[in-house]
Image: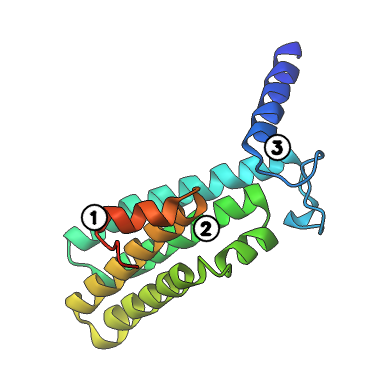
């Protein structure tokens, strides 16, 4: 029992250090995240992350086997689950505000545009090159979004991809 309490206290201190939550009781001030406790939010994060990783892993097999419809569905589930998992940690309202922030809105539009292009190419046009193009847009946009969270991340992203002039 003492070990569980000790582990919880270490976890709470780690989360405070990482500044993942806005208030000291780990609930967002605007009542976000369905009034879940810290352990429920962490379980939601882990569950969504595991489902996302599993569907991402399966999507690799689907594209290797040229099952573009299955790939587009599995990769979309991967993207949505990864975004949902971070929503459990920081709150869904804060996640939405982050997605629509001035410096991240381009990445958000790119992610969802790539997802739509992937779906249209797979289900309507049945063209592999369209699926690959949509997938590429999704991946680059997701990487940009991830880098934009880090301090000086967008600058690093532009330097890594030789876009110094932006």
Count residues near mark 1 (Cα–Cα under 10 Å), then give few for <14, some for 14-19, many for 20+: some
Q: Choose mark 3 or mark 1, whichever is in front.
A: 3
Q: Earlier in the sequence, mark 3 or mark 1?
A: 3
Mark 3 nearby-residue class (10 Å; few <14, some 14–19, many ≥20): few
Q: Nearer the viewer, mark 2 or mark 1?
A: 2
User: Which residue is painted at 75% across and 19% down in the image?
Assistant: 5
Q: Disc 2 or 1, which lies upstream in sequence?
A: 1
Quadrant of image for the C terminus: bottom left
Q: Is residue 137 above or below residue 87?
A: below
| Residue 146 % position (x, y) | 45, 54
* Horizontal side of residue 66 vs 155, given as left or right: left
- The CA distance from mark 3 to mark 1 is 33 Å
The reply to whether discs 2 and 1 touch (Cβ–Cβ < 8 Å) is no
- Coordinates of residue 85 in the picture (x, y in percent): 56, 51
Determine the CA span between mark 3 and mark 2: 19 Å
* Residue marked by disc 1: 61
- Residue at 55% in and 42% down: 46
**Mark number displayed over residue 39:** 3
Residue occupying the point 33% across, 63% down: 140
Q: Residue furthest bottom?
A: 124
Q: Which mark is residue 83?
A: 2
């Amino acid at each position: 029992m003492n070990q569980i309490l000790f582990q919880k206290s270490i976890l709470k201190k780690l989360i405070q250090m990482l500044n993942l939550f806005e208030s000291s009781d780990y609930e967002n001030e605007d009542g976000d995240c369905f009034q879940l406790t810290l352990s429920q939010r962490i379980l939601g994060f882990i569950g969504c992350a595991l489902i996302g990783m599993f569907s991402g892993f399966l999507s690799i097999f689907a594209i290797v086997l040229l099952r573009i419809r299955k790939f587009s569905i599995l990769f979309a589930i991967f993207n949505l689950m990864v975004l949902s998992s971070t929503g459990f940690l920081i709150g869904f309202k804060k996640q939405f505000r982050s997605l629509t922030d001035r410096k991240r809105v381009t990445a958000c539009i790119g992610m969802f545009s790539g997802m739509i292009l992937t779906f249209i190419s797979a289900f309507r046009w049945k063209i592999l090159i369209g699926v690959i193009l949509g997938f590429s847009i999704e991946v680059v946009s997701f990487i940009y979004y991830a880098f934009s969270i880090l301090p000086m991340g967008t600058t690093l992203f532009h330097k890594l991809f030789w876009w110094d002039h932006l």
